[in-house]
Image (cartoon, grey):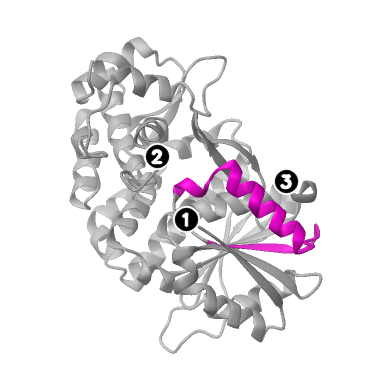
Amino acid sequence: MTETTKTSSTQKPGAPEPETVRVALGPRSYDIVIGADLLSQAGAYIAPLLPRPKSVIVTDTNVAKAHLKTLQTSLEAAGIEQAHYVVPAGEASKNFSQLEQLCDWLLSQKIEREDCVIALGGGVIGDLTGFAAAILRRGTRFIQIPTTLLAQVDSSIGGKTAVNSSLGKNLIGAFHQPDLVLADMDVLKTLPERELRAGYAEIVKYGALGDIEFFDWLETNGQKVLALDTKSVAHAVAQSCRAKAAIVARDEREAGERALLNLGHTFGHAFEKITGYGDALLHGEAVAYGMVLAFAFSAHRGDCDGSDATRLRAHLEACGLPATMAQVGNGAFDVDALIDAMGQDKKVKAGKMRFILARALGDTYIAEDVSAEALHPFLIAQGARP
């Protein structure tokens, strides 16, 4: 069960009251607080969670310049001692080398199991920090302060933590739930437009996989969300968080239903791997095109009406997201390399690929009958090299 409440706070005049979405996981339950100006109030939210007034912050080079000082000031005002660690910005930092360096630094700070490590950043920082917290002293606590739209609606929620392998994305990790998620709408104002669009793809995902009314709303209001209209973006983030929190509460470790949250990811991760997990293709862009392919493949199989695939593609394209293979990574892709990369996906079971496919917009399912032989001609028709 997912609860949503309004939270009392000292908001700036005219700012809407923050909203709290509860992730109901028994003793591992926690709140996602969504609102404006939360970073400057972070100390007040975090202090009650600490057994002693000590914390550490993990962030990246870009976020440190924009937001680290605000968080430090807030923690200091709450009487919380803090130190910080900065990793290079970008997906390339989600690797074993950075994980080892981070763990060594956390140990040098004498972090104890009941202390909270604060992840201040996007999905890379959340995944890397969360995984370090999961394995440090066999598990320490951590807090997510996501600074990208994508992280606010997806990667900061649900306890998935990981680093990448040369064989694929997020293949080495652990489930480790945070103690708190603070999603500050104001920090989104510092994001480049491309990062905002990439995050918006994950918002569209929630409508496409299980909420046609939300998808309808996005078709009307998506441009307002991308323009960071306060009311629109807060609604989109809260609705996405409610959707994910409800699924995570029912299936924390992805034994079944939670796999639906990977709509577009099996296709998308393959393109990310081939393009090198860099700026050539952002994760949200890969998910956007992955969803286009998932719906197109569903229509190809006769599972859903082609008009739904066209409608999804049109909305993503209108929002500046890649909708054709030619728009992904500015390069051609070998069909066998794509299929091989998909074979390393985390959802592979008993050697068989599993995909999230669609019966209609808002109605998706887990398909366990997809063969490489079926994918081959489909991907060539989409533009892959034979």
Q: Residues within 10 Å of mark 3 (few under 14, many from 20)?
A: some
Query: As rendered, which of 32 and 194 lies closer to the eye?
Result: 194
Quarter of the image that includes the C terminus: top left
Residue at numbered disc 2: 209
- Residue 208: in magenta span: no
Q: Is residue 357 left or right of residue 321?
A: right
Give amino acid for label 2. Leu
Question: What is the magenta range?
Answer: 91-120
Q: Please tell me which residue lies in front, 197 or 5.
A: 197
Give the residue type that dot 1 points to.
Answer: Ala
The residue type indicated by label 3 comes to Ile
The answer to whether residue 289 is left or right of residue 83 is: left
Q: CA distance from mark 1 to mark 3?
A: 21 Å
Name the one closer to the observer, 87 or 168.
Answer: 87
Q: From the viewer's perspective, is residue 354 above or below residue 118? A: above
The mark nearer the N terminus, 2 or 3, is 3
- The residue indicated by pointer 3 is 135
Kindly identify the residue that appears in the image at 76 percent across and 63 percent down.
Answer: 115
Compute the Cα span from label 2 to label 3: 32 Å
| 105 is within the stretch colored magenta | yes
Q: Is residue 341 visible?
A: yes
Residue 54 x/y as whole percent: 75, 72
Which residue is rendered at x = 62% and y = 48% of the image? 99
According to the image, label 1 marks what residue? 151
Indicate the secondary structure of the residue bearing disc 2: helix
How far from the left and from the top, in percent, is residue 16?
44, 78
Quadrant of residue 190 in the image? bottom left
Task: Give the residue drawn at x 48%, y 73%.
Answer: 67
How many marks are shown on the rendered structure? Answer: 3
